[in-house]
Image: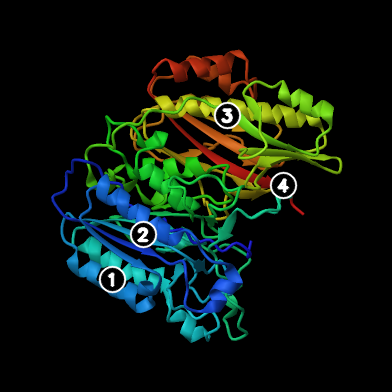
């Protein structure tokens, strides 16, 4: 994972709206660094193409749609350590009661999860323009923007003055900035990495070389909402628009993968942010970005505070972006499109079977998915290189391909009609959503309304199984605002077992109790065309009030 250095400019685009309920000012500080002063930073990690474009497009959406009139921009040479810290101090001075502050950074990053980085455990760091890649440890520390040292004092002072902050960071290991698997599918590089691996130093303290996860420090803010391009163990991607294999960005230019998704969310072009009758919340922005990136990139955006740290009377997750009381106007939703697939090295008879599948279209370029053969195995995965399943049985691979179409259909229906806020996250999301054989996993759920929960797992081999409800107690209503653990006490634990690959965890939350809930709890394996799934489809189509969220996990065999 040390070969992708990807720091996208997704810092903090507060997603405002047209009318506002706060009388304060709206101030944005946008930072993007593509070219670093030390040539070795570029030679070792590759030029970043997205950060300056990220900042320019962020400025456009903040001004045109969210009506920010005070937008401060630092790019490349302007974003030296002194330049950034001076801008942060000025932001602290200028902020006041009721203000909405947006802080955004796009560029290279590192963290204590990079064992060679001089960063406090539980914190992240962004590289200033003048970071000395070949400098001494002391010189490097003096040119890193470290969360605990440089950001936290400023952000705490700003919220103490009565302002609210939205912070977005597009860099590697950015999941704690304020506190990849080689699949064999592709050999091209449509992405650049935003990570800078810092050379080891024998004088470093041994406590940087951790093999077990220590408890993180508590979230230090009450008015700061934070979204990052990746978890604190993942690298972030820079999309190279010149590559034929790279997904198209909104502007057609190179961008950070996270930033491109955030821009789409801020413009109201993603399903979660296009409802015109309700305010757009922080949670909806996060879900829009996460869902758009799921399956396309080997990174999982993270959000703070954690669900267990955000249990106030008015959780930050449910507060409107930039304090606005009106959401971004609705956009026309796109109709369901077929799964596009590129085939490589497949026997003719196998290709004929795939050509006969509904909602699957074979293309030569620009495919969402790739299906290829290596030796006796078939590899099915995303065109970005993320593996979904590897199996020698063509029938299992075809079944999984069919389920991908099913997932796309169910996701489109759910996202088009869902009306409830649903916060659904994996507990201790620290390792990039990669789980090893025999590890147990649990989830946390919360909604602003009472309702009934369903959790399904679309497995790598195409099977769909019920994870919740599985006991009589799990058939009960979940109270509004209450954080609920999945599985519940007394229910079987959820453990990682074969088959390995890519799982989709689909969470549905209904205000009224579904008639099929009891039957679902008694049936482990769900048939896509069976009675239960038909009833679920009917519930999603007929206007019932419900919420929807999903998590994509990668499961691997323990060596």
Badge 2 vs badge 3, beta-carbon distance below 8 Å: no
> Tag 2 or tag 1, which sits nearer the N-term?
1
Circle number at residue 185: 4
Q: For the residues marked 3 and 1, what is the alpha-carbon distance in whole angstroms?
A: 45 Å
Comes first in the chain, label 3 or label 1:
1
Look at 47% across and 73% down and name the residue there: 36
- Can you see residue 393? yes
Quadrant in which the C terminus is drawn: bottom right
State how many labels appear: 4
Q: CA distance from mark 2 to mark 3?
A: 33 Å
Mark 4 burial class by Cα count in 10 Å: few <14, some 14-19, many 20+: many
Depth check, mark 2 against mark 3: the one in front is 2
Left or right: 87, with 496 as reference point: left
3 or 1: mark nearer the eye: 1
Q: Quadrant of residue 526?
A: top right
Q: Marks 1 and 4, Cα distance to the nearest angstrom?
A: 44 Å
Would you call the spot at circle 2 few (<14 residues within 10 Å), some (14-19), or many (20 or more)? many
**For the residue labelled by badge 3, is the local secondary structure a helix, a strand or a loop?**
helix
Residue tagged 2: 104
């Amino acid at each position: 994972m040390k070969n992708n250095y990807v720091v996208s400019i997704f810092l903090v685009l507060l997603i405002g709206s047209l009318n506002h309920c706060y009388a304060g000012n709206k101030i944005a500080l946008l930072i993007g660094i593509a070219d670093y002063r030390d040539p070795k930073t570029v030679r070792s990690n590759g030029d970043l193409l997205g950060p300056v474009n990220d900042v320019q497009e962020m400025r456009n959406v903040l001004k045109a749609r969210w009506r920010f009139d005070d937008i401060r921009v630092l790019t490349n040479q302007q974003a030296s350590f002194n330049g950034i810290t001076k801008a942060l101090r000025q932001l602290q001075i200028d902020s006041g009661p009721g203000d909405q502050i947006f802080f955004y950074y796009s560029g290279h990053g590192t963290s204590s999860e990079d064992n060679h980085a001089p960063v406090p455990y539980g914190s992240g760091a962004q590289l200033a323009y003048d970071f000395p890649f070949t400098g001494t440890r002391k010189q490097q520390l003096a040119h890193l923007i470290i969360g605990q040292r440089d950001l936290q004092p400023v952000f705490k002072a700003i919220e103490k003055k009565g302002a609210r902050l939205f912070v977005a960071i597009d860099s590697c290991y950015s999941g704690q900035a304020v506190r990849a698997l080689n699949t064999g599918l592709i050999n091209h590089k449509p992405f650049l990495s935003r990570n800078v691996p810092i050379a080891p130093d024998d004088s470093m303290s041994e406590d940087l070389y951790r093999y077990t996860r220590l408890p993180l420090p508590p979230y230090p803010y009450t008015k700061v909402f934070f979204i990052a391009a990746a978890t604190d163990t993942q690298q972030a991607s820079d999309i190279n628009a010149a590559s034929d294999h790279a997904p198209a960005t909104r502007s057609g230019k190179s961008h950070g993968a996270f930033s491109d998704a955030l821009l789409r969310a801020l413009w109201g072009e993603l399903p979660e942010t296009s409802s015109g009758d309700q305010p757009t919340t922080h949670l909806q922005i996060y879900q829009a970005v996460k869902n758009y990136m799921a399956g396309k990139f080997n990174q999982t955006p993270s959000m703070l505070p954690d669900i267990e740290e955000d249990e106030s009377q008015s959780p930050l997750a449910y507060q409107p972006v930039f304090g606005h009381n009106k959401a971004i106007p609705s956009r026309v939703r796109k109709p369901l499109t077929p799964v596009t697939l590129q085939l490589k090295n497949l026997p003719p008879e196998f290709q004929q079977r795939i050509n006969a599948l509904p909602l699957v279209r074979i293309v030569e370029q620009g495919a969402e998915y790739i299906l290829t053969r290596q030796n006796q195995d078939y590899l099915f995965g995303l065109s970005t290189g993320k593996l979904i399943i590897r199996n020698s049985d063509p029938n299992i691979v075809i079944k999984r391909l069919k389920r991908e179409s099913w997932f796309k259909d169910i996701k489109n229906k759910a996202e088009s009609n869902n009306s409830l806020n649903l916060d659904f996250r994996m507990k201790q999301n620290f390792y990039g959503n990669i789980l090893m054989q025999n590890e147990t996993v649990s989830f946390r759920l919360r909604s602003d309304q009472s309702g009934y929960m369903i959790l399904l797992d679309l497995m790598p081999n195409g099977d769909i199984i019920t994870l919740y409800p599985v006991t009589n107690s799990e058939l009960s209503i979940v109270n509004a605002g209450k954080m609920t653990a999945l599985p519940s006490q007394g229910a079987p634990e959820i453990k990682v077992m074969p088959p390995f690959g890519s799982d989709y965890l689909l969470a549905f939350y209904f205000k009224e109790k579904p008639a099929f809930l009891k039957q679902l709890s008694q049936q482990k394996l769900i048939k896509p065309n069976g009675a239960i799934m038909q009833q679920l489809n009917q519930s999603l189509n007929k206007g019932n009030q419900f919420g929807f969220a999903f998590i994509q996990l990668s499961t691997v065999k323990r060596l």
